[in-house]
Amino acid sequence: MHKIEISVIMPVYKGDVAPHFDDALASVVDQSYPAKEIVVIKDGPLTDELYQVLDKWCKKSELIKPVTLEKNVGLSSALNAGIDAANYEWLARMDADDICKPDRFEKQVRFIEANPEVSILGSWITEFDEDMNEEIAVRKLPETHDEILNYAKWRCPFNHMTVMYKRDAIVALGKYKNYGAVGDDYELWARFLVNGYKSGNLQEVLVDARTGKDFFGNRRRGMKYFKNEVREINDLYKLGLINPLHYAFHFSIKAVVRFSPPALVKLIYKGIRKTS
């Protein structure tokens, strides 16, 4: 019998799309291995449509546990509020616009039971357009802890919406830092890795993710985002995950992404995905 108990943590804010939120909630409720609770963090006031979706699911499922934040505090702080509210040993991250495969939790639990030394576990994702009609890419990541550690020096080693981690571990590590919504998890993954917590990535797609029209648009461009990412790169260096060569690589890539025309960024992104 499975003994692992899961809390899902899912932030939602007014910019999320109600039908996408509905799909995301349906996918975490209808799991072959159900979570014990689904902690939905309302990051400030929501739209009427989002409230209606949440109310519907609160009536349909006893798993839903809303957490209300009076004002919008941003993704990192909202996730930390979800961690504080969660009651179970393992936490499963989920975005308010992605879709879990129906056996996501079952497969992750099976791996964790077979590998009890693991404290953080992710998987591959398939990236789609905003309407989930066009497949953009499959983001594949390395499998074993040593492979993940080496990969993390160059690129983010986990797909955040697939990750499950031990609550005690993330609390001990200090939870999420705030990098202005551009690097809320990479530095956290680095803390897991450099502090000796064992990791893994299942070698299959367990979440379908919406890349969205804003990903290649103008919204996340300019000096403000670049400065936040440099803060994160500095912290990766201070942690000892990266050396000066890695630092220069990250700095250059972030500069190109934040200051180049969207069309060029899209070409670069597709090229990177082909090497994944």
Image: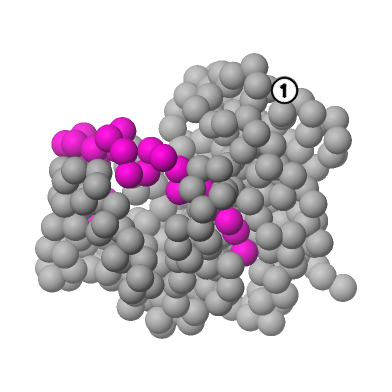
- Dot 1, how many residues are within 10 Å of its Cα: few (below 14), some (14-19), or many (20+)? some
Residue 261 x, y percent position in the rendering: 19, 43
The magenta segment is 206-233
Mark 1, secondary structure of its residue: helix
Report whether residue 88 is seen.
no
Residue at 18% across / 68% down in the picture? 246
Please determine whether, in this image, residue 82 is positioned above or below residue 185: above
Residue 88 highlighted magenta (yes or no): no
Residue sticking out furthest to the front: 134
Give whichever of 46, 186 is nearer the camera.
46
Location of the C terminus by quadrant is bottom left
Residue at 63% across / 30% down in the picture? 18
The number of numbered discs placed on residues in the rendered structure image is 1
The residue to which callout 1 is attached is 52
Location of the N terminus by quadrant is bottom right
Residue 159 x, y percent position in the rendering: 48, 60
Residue at 21% across / 51% down in the picture? 264
Residue at 19% across / 57% down in the picture? 253
Residue 226 highlighted magenta (yes or no): yes
Quarter where residue 4 is shown: bottom right
Please determine whether, in this image, residue 36 is positioned above or below residue 115: above
Q: Is residue 208 left or right of residue 151?
A: right
Report whether residue 106 is seen.
yes
Give whichever of 204, 55 is nearer the camera.
204
Q: Is residue 91 left or right of residue 16?
A: right
Q: Amino acid at mark 1?
A: Gln
